[in-house]
């Protein structure tokens, strides 16, 4: 279990994204629990999720809860982000890139965080397409998070983005995360703690 988490959750902070740590801010979390409970059905039907909404609303936490819960059940999950993938692919030769992408498809569930923040260079878009298309053809579930709106995903500006978004929308059920900005709430709490600490030392 420990190895599955260390390998599958490429950001160690994701290990804290668990249902036990859910503070009840996100009204959609029941959908995350349902996805885990019906995992065998999701796997068989190749059903993924597209988590979209504003910055800081808990999309990564939502996806991380699914990842941790499935790993606790012994299901290998890889959760990473497009920035990390592109940084890795940039330093690889063509055949190594193909091998790297194929290795991601060895996981029954792949979770890709932050679609849409990648650079709009020809290389970056081609690699994002390769990752998404490879997963699409693998016949296995994919969960994607994005700050893009559903309208932006359905009406891309050009063909390069359309090739990516069409595949995501075909295999991933859109779910808007409507929560308030949790990061701002956390920053407010931290600020109040700091003020209390400084006042105590004054």
Image (cartoon, rainbow, N blue to C red):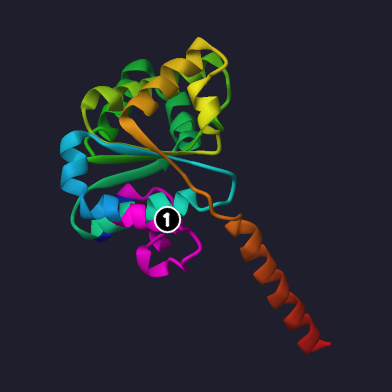
Identify whether 61 is placed above or below 55: below
Question: Dot 1 surroundings within 10 Å: few (below 14), some, or many (20 or more)?
Answer: many
Q: Is residue 1 left or right of residue 17?
A: left
Q: Is residue 3 visible?
A: no
Asked whether 175 falls inside the magenta stretch, the response is no
Horizontal arrangement in the rendering, residue 81 relative to residue 182 (left or right)? left
Give the residue furthest to the top.
159
* The quadrant where residue 190 appears: bottom right
Local secondary structure at mark 1? helix
Residue 190 visible somewhere in the drawing: yes
Q: Could you say which is closer to the camera, residue 86 or residue 184?
A: 184
The image quarter containing residue 17 is bottom left
User: Quick check: 152 above or below 71?
Assistant: above
Quarter in which the N terminus is drawn = bottom left
Q: Residue at x 26, y 36 (%)?
A: 47
- Number of numbered tags placed on the structure image: 1
The x and y percentages for residue 109 are 27, 41
Q: Which of 45 and 197 is in front in this view?
A: 45
Q: Residue 10: within the magenta? A: yes
Instruction: Report the residue at 49% width, 11% height from top.
Output: 159
What's the residue at 53%, 50% (across, down)? 178
Q: Is residue 91 above or below residue 44?
A: above
Image coordinates of residue 163 in percent, x first then y, are 42, 16
Instruction: Say which quadrant the C terminus sits in.
Output: bottom right
Q: In the image, which residues are magenta?
A: 8-33
Looking at the picture, does residue 33 appear above or below residue 126? below
| Along the line of sight, the residue nearer the viewer: 110 or 102 | 110
Q: Residue at coordinates 21% horizontally, 35% vertically from top-left?
A: 106
Task: Tell whether 64 sits left or right of 56.
Answer: left
| Residue ID for mark 1 | 14
């Amino acid at each position: 279990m420990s190895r599955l988490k260390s390998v599958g959750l490429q950001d160690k902070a994701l290990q804290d994204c668990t249902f036990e740590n859910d503070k009840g801010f996100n009204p959609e979390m029941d959908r995350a629990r349902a996805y885990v409970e019906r995992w065998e059905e999701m796997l068989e039907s190749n059903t993924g999720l597209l988590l979209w909404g504003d910055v800081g609303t808990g999309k990564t936490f939502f996806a991380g809860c699914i990842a941790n819960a499935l790993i606790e059940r012994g299901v290998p999950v890889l959760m990473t982000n497009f920035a990390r993938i592109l940084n890795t692919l940039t330093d690889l030769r063509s055949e190594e890139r193909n091998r790297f992408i194929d290795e991601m498809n060895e996981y029954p569930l792949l979770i890709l965080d932050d679609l849409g923040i990648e650079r709009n260079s020809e290389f970056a878009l081609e690699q994002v397409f390769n990752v998404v298309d490879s997963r699409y053809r693998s016949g296995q579930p994919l969960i994607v998070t994005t700050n893009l709106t559903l309208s932006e995903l359905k009406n891309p500006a050009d063909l390069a983005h359309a090739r990516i978004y069409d595949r995501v929308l075909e295999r991933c059920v859109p779910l808007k995360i409507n929560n308030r900005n949790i990061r701002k709430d956390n920053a407010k709490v931290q600020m109040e703690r700091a003020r209390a600490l400084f006042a105590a030392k004054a």
